[in-house]
Image: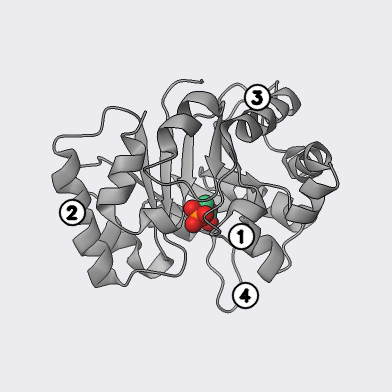
Amino acid sequence: MNGVNLFVANWKMNMTRAQARAYAEDLGSRIGDGFDAGELVLAPAFTALEAARDPRGRWALAAQNLSDHAAGAFTGEVSATMIAEAGCRYVIVGHSERRTLFGEDGPLLARKLARAREAGLVPIYCVGESQRERAAGSTAATLARQAEALADDPEDRPLVVAYEPVWAIGTGLAATPADSAAAATGLRKILASRRDLRVLYGGSVNPGNARQLLQGGGVDGFLVGGASLEAATFAAIAGAG
Ligand code: PEP
């Protein structure tokens, strides 16, 4: 849709350093000299970033979260500067697990987006409606409200937005390509002034539904959770287009 497709593996709180190293070796041997159907990104836990790094640069790294503060007395937090220094190009902001399990809301996410930009990171900003919002017919309104956190984000910088319906995450029940396309079209309209926007779909993507979603879902790639935990499956999804 908008240049190079993007495939992001969100490992969540899985994968030790040893497992990350083995995965990286496996992925590397599968893609050989490089992956030419898009850009690959691994999003490990902070502790496994170095282990997941590819010295040959065939994939980029993302952090799964960042602090909304730049530095200081915030025990247990990790700053955008630290994430950038650790070799990340991207950072996931506003994943639904952060929103629902950790109470992250629009104002907090707007601050996180600002910290990400200060450090030169590209945000992968997640949006998506709950089952209840979907049933109430308020998907578009939910996405528009969640996109408000981007109001102060600079329009001339690359941005990735991941449409991740909450009801599809980890449930095995992916959105249809038509659902994805409707959401992606709405998001592109809201963010029409952005110069470099890629819209991803996330939610129970697997090698069996990836092609259809990529071809009919109006998106520039995927954010993949469970199915990204095996290099073979992640590579199959990324290669499905
Ligand atoms: C996610 O958590 O970002 C996700 C898309 O998970 P899954 O692929 O497991 O539904």
Left or right: where 118 falls relative to 142: left
| Outermost bottom residue | 75
The residue singled out by tag 3 in the image is 194
Q: Which mark is first along the chain, 1 or 2?
A: 2
Comparing labels 3 and 2, the label whose residue is closer to the camera? 2
The residue singled out by tag 4 in the image is 74
Left or right: where 212 falls relative to 128: left
The residue singled out by tag 2 in the image is 26
Q: Amino acid at mark 3?
A: Arg
Comparing labels 2 and 1, the label whose residue is closer to the camera? 2
Comparing labels 2 and 4, the label whose residue is closer to the camera? 2
Left or right: where 137 falls relative to 99: right
Q: Position of residue 161 (x, y in %)?
A: 60, 38
Q: Secondary structure at mark 2?
A: helix
Tag 1–tag 3 contact (CB < 8 Å): no
Q: Residue at x 56, y 24 (%)?
A: 196
Q: Residue 70 has which mark?
A: 1
Q: Which mark is first along the chain, 4 or 2?
A: 2
Q: Position of residue 99 (x, y in %)?
A: 69, 61
Q: Amino acid at mark 1?
A: Ala
Tag 2–tag 1 contact (CB < 8 Å): no
Q: Residue 12 has which mark?
A: none
